Amino acid sequence: MASGGYRQPSNPAPVSGPGALSKRTDGGGPGNQQPVRVPTGGSYGDATQMQKLQQAAPLAASPGGDMAQPAGPALPPGVDFGAPTQQPDVPVTDGADLGAGAGLEALGLTPQKDDDMQRLVQYLPVLEHMANQPGSSKAARNLVRSLKGMI
């Protein structure tokens, strides 16, 4: 079995020459570039400017090829800003604490302040001292955090 000796390098070239004799060593060349892609739309002259910019600094061909659709789940279609409502019987203030419709409790984000929690706020300094002790439970620290959040 032959091992060793000169091996002819393929594209890319191993070393570039000096000055006018220089050649690309990254394998890029006229046949190994991404095609020029110009988006539609925009102002007058934008497409020509974009085409010239892409031709001035061509990118090497990507190994993955073109993809027609992005990977992942498709997003549902959006609603235009000026379009009529799709829920005519629901007030705009639904989910807010003021106006018509359900309040914040409908969102189910945070528990409402009940009377017991309001009474515990006066004991906050003692409970905070307890929660700061070594070996304090997570429940004690979470109670202090929720009480502080009510203030």
Image: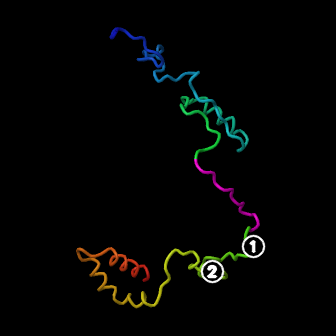
Residue 20 versus residue 59 in the image, above or below: above
Q: Residues within 10 Å of mark 1 (few under 14, many from 20)?
A: few
Q: Is residue 127 magenta?
A: no
Q: Residue at x 33, y 88 (%)?
A: 123
Residue labelled with disc 2: 102
Q: Residue furthest front?
A: 1
User: Residue 115: x and y, percent?
Assistant: 45, 90
User: Residue 60: x and y, percent?
Assistant: 54, 29
User: Residue 4: x and y, percent?
Assistant: 33, 10
Q: Residue at x 34, y 76 (%)?
A: 139
Inspect the image, locate mark 2, and give the three-letter code of the amino acid beneath it.
Answer: Ala
Residue labelled with disc 1: 88
Bounds of the magenta span?
72-85
Q: Residue at x 24, y 74 (%)?
A: 135
Q: Is residue 141 left or right of residue 60?
A: left
Residue 25 found in image quarter: top left
SS for dot 1: loop
Inspect the image, locate mark 1, and give the three-letter code of the amino acid beneath it.
Answer: Pro
How has the structure been colored for display? rainbow
